[in-house]
Image: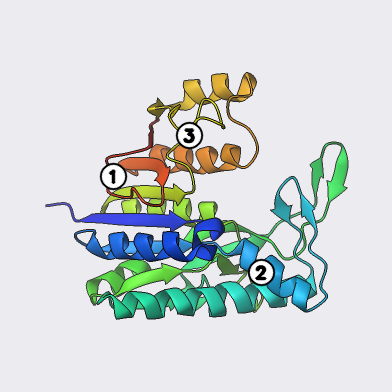
Amino acid sequence: MIPKITIVKVGGAVVEDEAQLSRLLQDFCAIDGPKILVHGGGRRATKIAERLNIETKMVNGRRITDAEMLEVVTMVYGGLVNKNVVARLQALGCDAIGLTGADANILLSAKRPVKMVDGTPVDYGFVGDVKQANGTKIAHFIDTGLIPVIAPLTHDGEGHMLNTNADTMASETAKAMAAVGFDVTLIYAFEKPGVLRNPDDDNSVIATINHADFEVYKADGTISGGMLPKIENALAATDAGVKRVIITQATAIDGLHGTVISS
């Protein structure tokens, strides 16, 4: 029988909201079978950087990670946020282990090259684009009864940490687990009940989105901004053999609600 695994990615806005985070962690612990939690933490990193008088620079919602900001995100994502989540899961009876991509070499990245954005070259600094996720190593933690809690940090194999998009981390982790024989459900949990036709109407959830739908919604502006890379990552996961991908509210991670993404 093919083993099932559930991977939940939770965004920084939920991590910052005490009530939402508490509910999500309880619901996460209640999920049957093996599971993995991938978390963000960008809002907390921005607040800590401000206290340290380090400027936060963003381009189209993407963080520019210079040397100072890399220190901040490494401390916040891999330390403050990750270990607090792990401690809270332990309190709920979930035996969790906090990881970054460098731990056990589970996620290896290449430093993102300079890219053109709206006709202007942008150097994102120490940002990683995932080259390889090691499903065998991640499965080792699962096999020993542990629940991996993965922070959005990878490494380049040459001793450098890299800030990495958490949605991408979740997609690459899901793909890696599918590649080593798991039946994978990937759930993107955030503040809204799914992908919305009207961002001001929480009842306008789009039930399903495939590649063709996505191109239409992207062209007519129904889907824009930060939802674009989230759906691109979701589609990449389904194309690579992930059985179910759902975008839903953090209070509804039972797999029965939200927007289902399919190839």
Compared to residue 45, the image places residue 243 above or below, namely above
* Residue on which disc 2 sits: 45
Neighbours of disc 2 within 10 Å: few (<14), some (14-19), many (20+) = many
Residue at 38%, 66% in the rendered image: 22
* Residue on which disc 3 sits: 195
Q: Position of residue 146 (x, y in %)?
A: 28, 75
For residue 225, side relative to residue 210 (left or right): right
Q: Amino acid at mark 1?
A: Gly
**Rendered image: mark on residue 255:** 1
Q: Position of residue 219 (x, y in %)?
A: 63, 20
Alpha carbon of mark 1 to alpha carbon of mark 3: how far? 15 Å
Neighbours of disc 3 within 10 Å: few (<14), some (14-19), many (20+) = many
For residue 23, side relative to residue 195 (left or right): left
Viewer-nearest residue: 223 or 101: 223
Compared to residue 227, the image places residue 82 above or below, namely below
Element under disc 2: helix
**Res 147 quadrant in image:** bottom left
Viewer-nearest residue: 218 or 29: 29
Disc 1, disc 3: CB below 8 Å? no
Alpha carbon of mark 1 to alpha carbon of mark 2: how far? 30 Å
Q: Amino acid at mark 2?
A: Ala
